[in-house]
Image (spheres, helix red, strand yellow):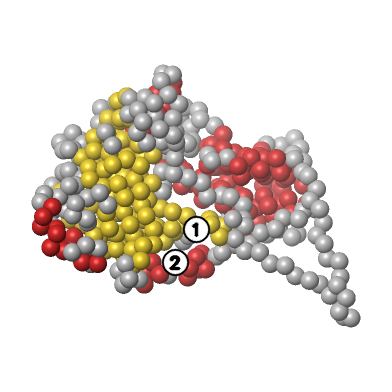
Amino acid sequence: MGTLGSLEIAEPPGHRSGVALVLEGESSLTKTVDPSSDWEVSLKADNSYIVANTSNILDREEAFHQGHEAIQESLDILSFDNKADLICTDVSDERLIWWEDQGAQHLRIVDNGSVTASTSATATVVDADGNIVDDSSPSTEWHEAMRYFRLAQVTNDLFDAYRNIYLSFERILSHIEPKSNEGEGAWLRRVLGNLPSGIDLGNYTDGSTNPVDDFMQEQYEVRNKIFHAKEGESRLRPQDTEDQETVQDSLENLTRFVIALIRETTPTNRSGGVITYAGFDFMTKWMEEKELELLTHRRYPPLVMNAEHDSDTSEPGLKSLLARANLEEENHTVTNFRNWIRAERIQSWGRPRRRVKTFTLSEVKDNRPLAEINLRELLSLENITVLEVQTGLYLINAGMARYQFPR
């Protein structure tokens, strides 16, 4: 039986597909919830994970999306029933997924880390005679739009961030041109079509040659779908993976637009610098060029897997590695193993102990450890045919406004 701590996973026929997500804080509740006839969601006291299982045969993406939704619905039920108020954390960067493919049980561990980068620069202005010129920047004047902006920066919830950044946008836009006796959409179109000369709306939309129409589609429609949840009307739901992607994409452009509007209309002294995606790609080029491997701990004999750059899960600002091993084949355990312990000792360990908790990422050339992946609970690999580990680094620009949020 596959287990994650004391929670059952990947156990056919009842648990063919599923997902495990990390709870923010360990649960003090042991409970199983059936949000639908197809899914069973379990959590146990003092376990860091919440697990969703189904007997349905799903591919990896569907196992994640459906399992994620089953977990969110179960947490809604537990909260309303006054059993526990819980939330998952870092879903996009830490999770386990299992699925069945052609009779083989697959398990993928996803564990991403971050690289926080910042840049700064100073300059001295001198006149023609070499005398230093006082070039001090003006002090920032407070504007009410900054209150909403700050709240958008400090929250850990993507939808809360969007609501507050939209209120910041609405507040500064009404400072530029107050709303008269007109509808909300008509006011927006009027003001967006007559912005201060220093602002090009096209820099903050992703669309065509009509930036006002693009903004209304990319932002105003998102705003309406977040601020309203009436039956029968289109809406965006918090904790829904696809809806969160929509909001994340809109938040970036709107945040940059708000900063530009405040800077244009209010004396400010906002600083900041960024590492570009091209710069990040250069910083992480070693993940594509070096020969890397993952070594398990607490499994005897240790399992060694080649870790290679994975373009399918990489994206701008995220560089991913993927390691894969067929656990029915033990040959890969000897790869580079003599550098860790004499290979002939493998024979004395007998039947492999298929439990893991920690992986070390190393460079093959000199066995230099580069990083560790630590599961929060001991993982049993019983019934698992193919083990995959996806790990990577994503960029956080400390010198720019926050618009990337855990999903």
Tally of numbered tags: 2
**In which quarter of the view is residue 35 placed?**
top left
Amino acid type at mark 2: Thr
The furthest residue to the top: 81
Name the quadrant of the C terminus. top left
Estimate the x, y position of residue 369 in percent, counting from the top left. 36, 62
Residue 115 is marked as 1
Which residue corresponds to mark 2?
Answer: 284
Q: Residue at x 71, y 52 (%)?
A: 261
**In which quarter of the view is residue 36 placed?**
top left
Estimate the x, y position of residue 12 in percent, counting from the top left. 16, 38
Q: Residue at x 66, y 64 (%)?
A: 120
Amino acid type at mark 1: Val
CB under 8 Å between callouts 2 and 1? Answer: yes
**In which quarter of the view is residue 69 placed?**
top left
Estimate the x, y position of residue 202 in percent, counting from the top left. 62, 59
Numbered disc 2: secondary structure: loop
